[in-house]
Amino acid sequence: MDAILETQGLSKQFLGFTAVGDVSLSVRRGSIHGLIGPNGAGKTTCFNLLTKFIPPSSGSIRFNGRDITRMKPAEVARLGLVRSFQISAVFPHLTVLENVRVALQRQRGGSFDFWRSDSVLRRFDDRARELLEDVGLTTFAQRPAGELPYGRKRALEIATTLALEPTMMLLDEPTAGMTAEDVDRIVALVKRVAQGRTVLMVEHNLKVVEGLCDTITVLTRGRILAEGPYAEVSRNPEVVAAYLGSDPSIAGGSAHG
Amino acid sequence: MAGQATAFTAPTPHQSPGLPGLSLLGFNRAQSIAFLLLLAVLLVGPFVLYPVFLMKLLCFALFACAFNLLIGYVGLLSFGHAMFFGMGGYVAAHAAKVWGLSPELAILAGGAVGAVLGVVSGWIAIRRQGIYFAMITLALAQMVFFVCLQAPFTGGEDGIQSVPRGNFLGLFSLAPDMNMYWLVAGVFLAGFLLINRIIHSPFGQVLTAIRENEPRAISLGYRVDDYKLIAFTLSAALAGVAGGTKALVFGIATLTDVYWAMSGEVVLMTLVGGLGTVFGPVLGAAVIVSMQNYLAEFGAWVTVIQGCIFVACVLAFRAGIAGEVGRWLRVRL
């Protein structure tokens, strides 16, 4: 199997409490991989470990054949491993267009030229508009991002992430707190942008997971309980007991939000 | 910190409905008009008002603009900017008096020492955020104050006195106030325009992104500490220039300008004028310096009045003068 992201014995302790323990995860190149588990299972900690926003207590992480265990988050992003955030992460006082452009601006390398006019950034405007069109935000281009409705902010965030042409995207609950209509739009969007990339997503909404993910990993109490295709994992009695069984809404699909 | 900083920033409309004709130097239309007004005041001012008062005002205006670059556009609240301002003053005074450097070089020396101090203190301080950042800058500034109190070249309690203004480029005597005024106005204008350029540069765009959402900026691959350090250094250098200029204007460099109260004063000026606005700090400096000048006869009461104004600003005028005016007129100043 061609794994793009691999962890070996990844652990994180907070003051003796093991949030993530001995997680060995392997994400296949080109797949959409779901990370699920009940509240407090360590999904977000795991996610923050993978994107280097918190350092692991032990274990190692390899991305695209390179050991990234000791790297800083900005460096990991430069390698093409780009994350989103659970709470929508836009730059509220910048326009929607500028939000995407700040990401495109990364192509220049470091933007340390404080003596130059920002009109040099206009060459990114066309590409920014294309990306906005891709996520259906063209009409909002000149509005401050903070004024967008929630679902649109998430779409903007994905456009901003895509601007970096990431090899792999890590999405932290992309549909959290959305209306059903927005959920469908984001699912379609993720499916489309995942072409030619790898996606790892933390997700509560099991219907979304079922529809999108090729493989899922179930975490409970910081450990991997099961891994495999949704149909297989959802029949695993341990999983049903630990997670699905405790949640009666599984039959209907949507567990949270 | 970012949250607090943006809370103070006026939620202003993003596009100014624009006659395309009037937009100077990257300013929007309203800012262009304000800038022309500012130029007019700079030109007419010394014929109407006492030039020394205006020079003092301009030095503080530049200081406040430099400070605003950090708080308004990066979201970093430094509580130690007096160290750059005061140290810039000492070094410029020493350079002019002891080394006999010409005034423009003395002022540049003040800026250089501000930059060096800025790199060192910034490198230490940017590792922390919010109130911790502010406290580290305050602590470092107190250390600089102590050095200035003890070091032989600063003259301790006396400061460096009777500093000659010298000849600009070795040619024009700056002894007459009017001559000195044009130099100060030039320095102010150059600093003001440089800051405006920094804000509207590719670098400034990243700074704004960091202020707005630092984790997101990191996740886009920006090494935010590098950006913060450069911004901090630029701000410190400009504060040093302002301090150096002030020392030459008055012919004296004293402990007052490195004291922590001076760090507080620049916060006050920027808040009163409007955080994160281009013209706000100039207005804030004008208000505070005018108050100190014209209310001087009330003695210690000036501080009380200043305190009241500060409270009033925070309660009722949160976006500062420029921020509130901008909101009424629906423009960004």
Image (cartoon, coloured by chain):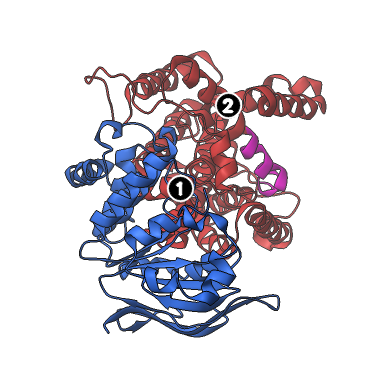
Chain colours: A blue, B red
Does dot 1 land on a helix, a strand or a loop?
loop
Does dot 2 land on a helix, a strand or a loop?
helix
Which quadrant, please, contains the C terminus of chain B? Answer: top left
Whether B260 is drawn above or below A34: the answer is above
Label 1 sits on residue: A88
- Give the amino acid type for the residue marked by disc 2 in the picture: Gly
Taken as a whole, is the magenta stretch helix, strand or loop? helix
Visible residue check, residue A38: yes
- What is the quadrant of residue A196 in the picture? bottom left
Residue B163: x and y in percent read 58, 45
Whether B279 is drawn above or below B247: the answer is above
- Give the amino acid type for the residue marked by disc 1 in the picture: Ser
Label 2 sits on residue: B320
Residue A210: x and y in percent read 37, 61
The answer to whether A253 appears left or right of B121 in the picture is left
Q: Name the residue at 26% across, 52% down.
A: A104
Q: Chain of mark 1?
A: A
Q: How many other residues sit within 10 Å of disc 2, few (<14), some (14-19) or many (≥20)?
A: many
Residue B195: x and y in percent read 41, 41
Residue A127: x and y in percent read 19, 47
Q: Name the residue at 50% across, 42% down.
A: B66
Q: How many other residues sit within 10 Å of disc 1, few (<14), some (14-19) or many (≥20)?
A: many
The answer to whether B258 appears left or right of B19 in the picture is right
